[in-house]
Image: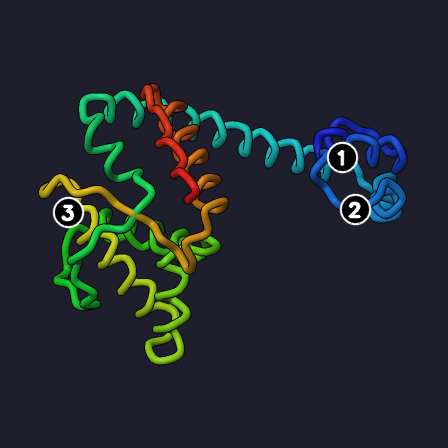
Amino acid sequence: MLEGLAEGETDPQVLAALKQPELRATPQQLADALAAAATMDREQRQVLQRFLERAKLIDRHLVQLHEATARCLRSHPEAVVRLAGVEESAGASKSDRSPKGNRVMRRVLNQAANAAVKTKGSIFQLQYRRLVPRLGHSKTVWAIAHRLCRLAWKILHEGVEYIEYGLTRDAKALQRRTAKLVRELRSLGYQVMPPAAPTQV
């Protein structure tokens, strides 16, 4: 729809028909929202086009970086598989204290922690909910980032596997998460066989 606007389309119905399938709004709702399309002048459309070009460039760069990362990781297949495991290792420290280190690594860990606490049903989401009333958002996220760092060190240096039990040991949820992780590993070029489903007794 944005590309249509940038290219000069003014008919709200035509623009609404360009919506992505996952968009929940109805065609009529979109048409109503796009009724002002005809009021956009050439300069506004040019600005929109520049933003769309920038977004596409960022997407291309992300794909290139993803491929470069995958190439780098292929020399460490066992470590990658262990880090992308589906269970949680035992024995990791839960301390939220950490010395100041590499700023780039701290930023990466912080981003990973923010993503982890938003993962529905994860142990990190449970830990976040437990700590945030006492520590606040920033300190809680860093506590989780510190735990992620220690878990990664333990997995890589001690050869243990990560087991994500989550909030409950839901067999279906575990199967879905396993399938997702297998797909991600395969997209990086690894040959991964999902574990056999446990036999029901």
Task: Describe the element under mark 1 as helix, strand or loop.
Answer: loop
Which residue does the image show at 27% across and 51% down from the upper left? 88
Q: Which residue is mark 3?
A: 153
Residue 65 in view in this figure: no
Sequence-wise first label, 2 or 3: 2
Q: Looking at the image, is mark 1 or mark 3 nearer the viewer?
A: 3
**Please, what is the three-letter code of the amino acid marked with disc 2?**
Ala
Among the 4 quarters of the image, the one containing residue 169? bottom left
**What's the distance in space between the residues labelled 1 and 2, CA to CA?**
9 Å
On the image, the x and y values in percent for residue 138 come to 35, 68
Residue 16 in view in this figure: yes
The quarter of the image holding the N terminus is top right
**Please, what is the three-letter code of the amino acid marked with disc 3?**
Trp
Task: Describe the element under mark 2 as helix, strand or loop.
Answer: loop
Q: Which residue is mark 1?
A: 19
Mark 1 neighbour density, 10 Å: few (under 14) some (14–19) many (20 or more): some
**Please, what is the three-letter code of the amino acid marked with disc 1?**
Lys
Q: Which residue is mark 2?
A: 25
Among the 4 quarters of the image, the one containing residue 5? top right
Say above or below: 136 vs 199.
below
Q: Are marks 1 and 2 in contact (CB under 8 Å)?
A: yes
Q: Is residue 55 left or right of residue 98?
A: right
Q: Is residue 109 left or right of residue 60?
A: left
On the image, the x and y values in percent for residue 93 come to 16, 62
